Amino acid sequence: MVMREHFNEELSELHNMVLRMGSVVEESIDRAIDSLLQHDMELAEVIIKDDDIPDNMELEIQDKCVTLIATQQPLAKDLRTICAALKISTDLERIGDYAVDIAKTTIRLDGQNYIKPLIDIPQMAKTTIGMIKDALDSYVNENVALAEEVCIRDDVIDGIYRNIFHEIISIMMDDSSTILQAMYLLLVARYIERIADHTTNICEWVIYTVTGEKKNLNN
Amino acid sequence: MDKIEVHDLNLFYGDFQALKNININIEANKVTALIGPSGCGKSTFLRTINRMNDLINGVSITGDVFMDGKNIYKDYDVIDLRKRVGMVFQKPNPFPMSVYDNIAYGPRIHGVKNKYELDAIVERSLKAAFLWDEVNDRLKKSALGLSGGQQQRLCIARVLAVEPEVVLMDEPTASLDPISTAKIEDLIDHLKEKYTIVIVTHNMQQAARISDYTAFFLMGEMIEWGQTEKLFYKPEDKRTEDYITGRFG
């Protein structure tokens, strides 16, 4: 006899809801960067319009968690799993918001030639999307080692961000007419850097679920 | 400070070993919860603390149980021990007499005759059990007319009347509704200021809510024992995790 079969099914469904939200958000980031690189206003508008999707998913996950806590009285790993789903959904929602911020930047820079070739920003985005994929993978497989390794990659993102920061400051100092666009590009880099931070949070929640230890791996 | 220390305790019902090498320290003025599936030995263990198992034929015990450093099987008179270690059972068991006489019963047996002294004990005990306000106008009426929850608090007051140091509770809320259960749980939280409490419960949430320490028993063994918060959040042993998450089967 399988014990708590219904509860197990509910936890499995919660797990799938988090993964679906992760996939939606990951795709949203990818498309937001594409819209910036391709000056694709139409795509940027779609991303902004679709922001309701992860927002609603977050609410559904939160409802599910509250219901499970109220009706199943979870303990030990079950409780940690549900708490982690609550927190991960919040991180994913914030990541989704940053995708929208990047899409809005695309629209603000409509018709402008970029003041520099966009090389570091796509590279940063690619690394960050890889982090999100692996964070979700570590969530699926409860892989603590992978979660820890993803957090280490955040250092790479921070390094690229510092380089972009200094480069853009130089561009602005050389030519003050670039300041507005330079600020927007710097903000995009900042958004991606924050996405990576939220991704390390997700990894920390994966580690917490498995081990019961809450570590701060975003130093 | 540890009130009770249990060293290598084994208990046999004839050939059947009901407790296997139990070692645990029970801290003074704390609530220690004993959890585990039916037949795991937790009630048997509870009864070793006031030697209630002495009343059962065929029971043999090895190992030591110390209270305040003295061996309860060697250094205590059993009457004195049971005065110091009171017990509350699953089903409220008021005596078929008045509320007043239920509470005064123990002190009278222990030689208190003075009416004013008994009155004071009855009032103090009923107040300590959060029952005084509900029964002070019916002290002379039968205790059997009280509700189940009131009867259980009466039984707790009856235990408190002889001023014990340790209170053992064997599933004290198992037959009570949620409101009565909540009252008993609040009461337990207050009682630990003066008493050391050991409680057997099948209700995981109750153990998590009211106890400072929890011990998990399985098939006569104590599998894991520690701070309640830790045991319910990140148990060390997979068998504990399986039990408290309801996947033991």
Image (cartoon, coloured by chain):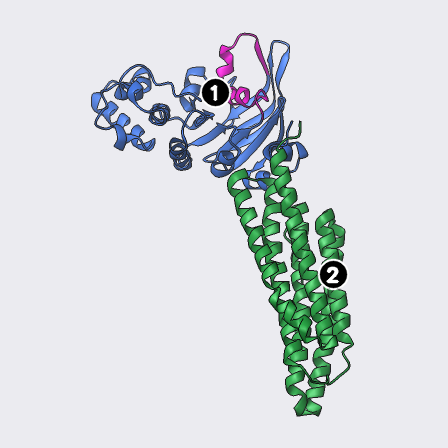
Chain colours: A green, B blue
Q: Which residues are magenta?
A: B37-61
Res B175 → quadrant: top left
Q: Residue at x 69, y 55 (%)?
A: A203
Q: Residue B91 location in percent, x, y? A: 42, 20
Q: Residue A97 location in percent, x, y? A: 61, 66
Q: For the N terminus of chain A, give its image quadrant.
A: top right
Q: Is residue A19 left or right of residue B175?
A: right
Type of the residue with mark 1: Asn
View extreme (front): residue: A42
Q: Which residue is mark 1?
A: B50
View extreme (top): residue: B57
Q: For the C terminus of chain A, give its image quadrant.
A: bottom right
Q: Is residue B33 magenta?
A: no
Q: Secondary structure at mark 2?
A: helix
Type of the residue with mark 2: Met
- Closer-to-camera residue (B13/A32): A32
Q: Which residue is mark 2?
A: A131
Q: Residue at x 43, y 22 (%)?
A: B87
- Closer-to-camera residue (A109/B32): A109
Q: Is residue B125 left or right of residue B22?
A: left
Q: Residue A130 location in percent, x, y? A: 76, 61
Q: Residues within 10 Å of mark 2 (few under 14, many from 20)?
A: many
Q: Are marks 2 and 1 in contact (CB under 8 Å)?
A: no
